[in-house]
Amino acid sequence: MECFFLGLDSSTQALKASLLESNLNVKSEIEVRFDQDLPQYGTKGGTLLGPSGSGIVYSPVMQLVEAIDLLFDRMKEAQWPVESIKGVSAAGQQHASVYWSLEAENLLAKINTNQSLAAQLEEAFSRQEIPNWQDSSTIEECKQLEEVVGGPSILARRTGSRAHTRFTAPQIMRFKRSEPEAYEKTSRISLVSSFITTMLCLDGAIKGIDESDACGMNIWNMEEEEGRGWDPLVLEAIAGKEGSSALKKKLGRVESDGGRIIGQIGEYFVRKHGFSKDCIVCPGTGDNPATFLAFTLKESEALISLGTSDTVLVSTSTYTPDPEYHAFFHPAQIVKPARQDKVNKIHSIEKQMRYFNMLVYKNGSLAREYVRDEYFDSSWDAFNAAVEANRSKKAGDTLDRTGFYWLKPDIIPANALGIHKYSRETSVTIAEKVLDFKDRSTNAIAILESQMISYRSRVSAILGEVGSSSSVRRVYATGGAASNPSICNVMADVFNCNVCKPVSFDVVTSAWKNANWNACSVAAAYKAAWAWHRHVASDEEQKWVDFDTFIQQCRRRRQHRRLTTADKETNGSLDMVEEDLAIVARPDEIRAEVYSNSIQWWKTLEERALEESRQ
Ligand code: XUL
């Protein structure tokens, strides 16, 4: 009998599900959109706002509970073969926290199919709001947290990030302060990913937080082995000396093996929807860690997601925290007992920790679209034509059109603001501040070069790159703007490596097409499949197979055709590099060298623009 895997993704605007075949081919996807499908909550973009100027952004917890029922109903309507689903896992928006009441575990233990989940869980929460990652109401709490711990760098070293308003520690701090009674009546605090995992099992136990997702809380100490755990300094900063052990209990255990089986799908889903009672559940993870897994990013590979804001993910085997960005544990790492000394009972652990870093830039498409609208009459075609006409050909080209377009106060560099442009006007070696470039059409290439050089220079620093040769081996481009060929071309030149994008094989047309599946729920299903595979494996090697190898094995199984030259021809413009992956841009040797040699002075100009933005 064919078996399937299910992945859920609880994002800001929707709860989504992906159904995958055993070779990890995406078979079908469905979703519940909060605004349209649950209009009784009155959300816009999935959220509600607090009083004007408060910075409060949240979503109602019951909206998510109702969405779960609705999503499973839709699986039934779509006739998904749920009885053959072997494993399920979830991804959830990062940082956002769910607050369980003292009665929660009791209620979770006696869920029945006669009533909806919402009707049975009305009393299960001590707080009706889930603070959303867009919330910025905790500026004071962030200041206090950094002060107690010893400053932003120390907090970043301990927890992977400096304090951020959306992170869970400052959010819990504000909740405790503004609703002390409700805080006291909180039995456990979940992240959205562990909340969904708990709801999938419905066995009366609130499930542990995934360790990779825990790194987005500002509470989990990521330092060396001895330090790993809920950080005592942060616990104290939130709850005081007297309250820190109670807070630690509320946070509960943390799951460090993302492929461990932590339960079976709840009886509720078995009886009501026909799931198999043997369907396993493994820990959920954050949406960014899930995106990272969807691409099985290897060391020295980067993923650039081009959205309203741009996000860069980079994989490393060293812990390189920095207040400018976020460090996380790899979301699918296993700690394998390597040797067992039966006499001394010493278990040595095979450790090869892996990490990824995330850089978030607020001014992504926002800034690109500003340039398009201001100089190119809102036309991408005109914007792209100007990029192609002005591609760098020799050293110094970029020097004449260096621009920084910080329309909103940015995250990287912190609080950078304003539009700053530099060009050589009177000297061949010195760039001067200008109101605009002589040739205004060069703003198109200037914005792309500036964004890409910023990403490259910071990724290089994380990878410990020396000299000017790029150590980034491959870049994956995703998000809306990744379909713009000019943007990908500049990306390839600046990073001096191939830019790739996922594609999928269309069995109807027998051709490759852009993969438009939802990366987070697909990656959650990958994780469920990996956990199930390890669970049923009879040999030791497969029981401990690492995530990347498992994905590779599945990829080979679904290889639809050999990647021959003939294949490339039949697939038109797609330049396939391996199963499910096409190259969209290759670097030009000369331009790549021009950019590599430009990084140093570009950094000097960025410093200057920053100073000017502070004045
Ligand atoms: C990352 C962040 C967002 C959310 C989106 O730090 O806040 O990407 O994870 O759900």
Image (spheres, rainbow, N blue to C red):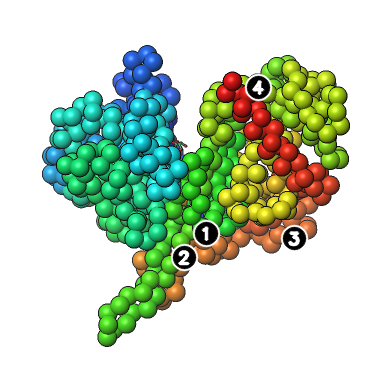
- Name the foreground residue: 229 vs 604: 604
Identify the amino acid type marked 2: Gln
Q: Residue furthest bottom?
A: 343
Earlier in the chain: of badge 3 and badge 4, it is: 4
Q: Which residue is mark 1?
A: 317
Q: Is residue 444 visible?
A: no
Earlier in the chain: of badge 2 and badge 1, it is: 1
Earlier in the chain: of badge 1 and badge 4, it is: 1
Q: Which residue is mark 2?
A: 352
Left or right: residue 280 versus residue 454 is left
Q: Mark 4 falls on what kind of element?
A: strand
Rendered position, 218 above or below 373: below
Earlier in the chain: of badge 1 and badge 3, it is: 1
Residues marked 2 and 1 touching at CB (< 8 Å): yes
Q: Which residue is mark 4?
A: 419
- Mark whose residue sits in front, 4 or 2: 4
Q: Tell me if mark 1 has few (under 14), some (14-19) or many (20+) residues whose alpha carbon lies within 10 angstroms of its own.
A: some
Earlier in the chain: of badge 3 and badge 2, it is: 2
> What residue lies at 50% left-to-right and 45% top-to-bottom?
322
Residue 386 % position (x, y): 80, 27
- Mark whose residue sits in front, 1 or 4: 4
